[in-house]
Amino acid sequence: MKKLKKWILILVGMYLLALISIYFGQDKLTFFPKKTTDEDWTEVIESVKGDYVSIRTSDKSVIEGIFLSDFSEEAKPTVIFFEGNAMRVEEFAHDFKRLSDNGINVLLMDYRGYGLSTGKPSADAFKKDAEEIFDAALKHPYVDNDNISVWGYSIGSGVATHLASVRPVSKVILSVPFTSTTDVAKRMFPIFPISKLIKHKLDNLALAPTLTQNALIMAGEKDMKIPASQAKRVADSWGGEVEFYLEPGKGHNDMLDGDIVWEKVIEFLNK
């Protein structure tokens, strides 16, 4: 009996230690900020022939990004892209030339703590920053204020749906979206009370029925991080017209590869 009690105490202690580790370690489990240099950033901007964008937020952080356009005199449809939690603008900016070459402006902003952006990453900060990014876009002379769409990738899907719920967003694109960050964490730690522990809450499924914008929701057939079933649940709950596309053979990190996704995005934004 004493040995049994000893083992129970050990197991309880290990469980409590794991709880503490999850709670205090969740920032590192959620965000993977990577910095860059002024030289690399300048090289990317010059190579994509974009405009450098710097936005000072209300809490005095600075968010850095790139504006892509054909820079004609008329205002054009614009999409703001919110990337995944391990992505930097300099890594994918060239891909988005496909949009600007087709008459669609693109605003790419590194999250706070990523690239040259300052500040500490958090879900609440990302949401607030997204609002300020949108408000800044409204002041750009090449942006059609009545035609600003959002595109969110993975964790960026939660930022995009939030923004669509509080600003006059025209259309919404979601790539490999989750139902909620809580659901993602529950898959990783099924035996823990995740809903009580998680600090960084983004909930696409809760917002989906309230959003009436037309949406394009895309998932990877072989996504092992966020199952396509979560994206389908978001699509089925969407309050507006929605197109759901399941990309055969794609996983979580390669949804920007190839031509089909880009063709669908361009077609959707040009409707």
Image: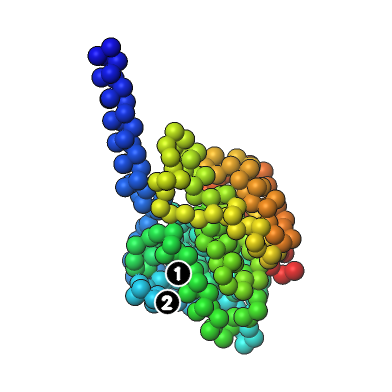
The residue depicted at 66 percent of the width and 47 percent of the height is: 232
The amino acid marked with disc number 2 is Ile
Question: The disc labelled 1 sits on which kind of residue?
Answer: Asp
Relative placement, left or right, of 260 versus 121 is right
Residue 152 % position (x, y): 56, 60
Q: Nearer the viewer, mark 1 or mark 2?
A: 1
The residue shown at (37%, 48%) is 26
Residue 32: image tag: none
Q: Position of residue 260 (x, y in %)?
A: 68, 54
Judge by depth and name the residue closer to the eye, 36 or 25: 25
Q: Are marks 1 and 2 in contact (CB under 8 Å)?
A: yes
* Image location of residue 88, percent across then percent down: 44, 60
Alpha-carbon span between mark 1 and mark 2 = 9 Å
User: Residue drawn 70% across and 59% down?
Assistant: 239
Which mark identifies residue 129?
Answer: 1
Q: Is residue 42 visible?
A: no
Q: Residue at x 64, y 86 (%)?
A: 74
The percent position of residue 158, horizontal first and vertical second, equals 53, 58
Please state which of residues 261 and 202 is positioned toward the viewer in this rendering.
202
Q: Is residue 39 left or right of residue 98?
A: left
Which is nearer the N-term, disc 1 or disc 2?
2
- In the image shown, does 202 or 69 lie closer to the viewer? 202
Q: Could you say which quadrant of the image residue 116 lies in? A: bottom left
Indicate the secondary structure of the residue bearing disc 2.
strand
**Residue beneath disc 2:** 55
Dot 2, how many residues are within 10 Å of its Cα: few (below 14), some (14-19), or many (20+)? some
Q: Which type of secondary structure does the marked residue at label 1 adopt?
A: helix
> In the rendered view, does 44 fall on the left or right side of 262?
left
Which image quarter holds the N terminus?
top left
Image height check: is 2 above or below 77?
above
Residue lying farthest top? 1
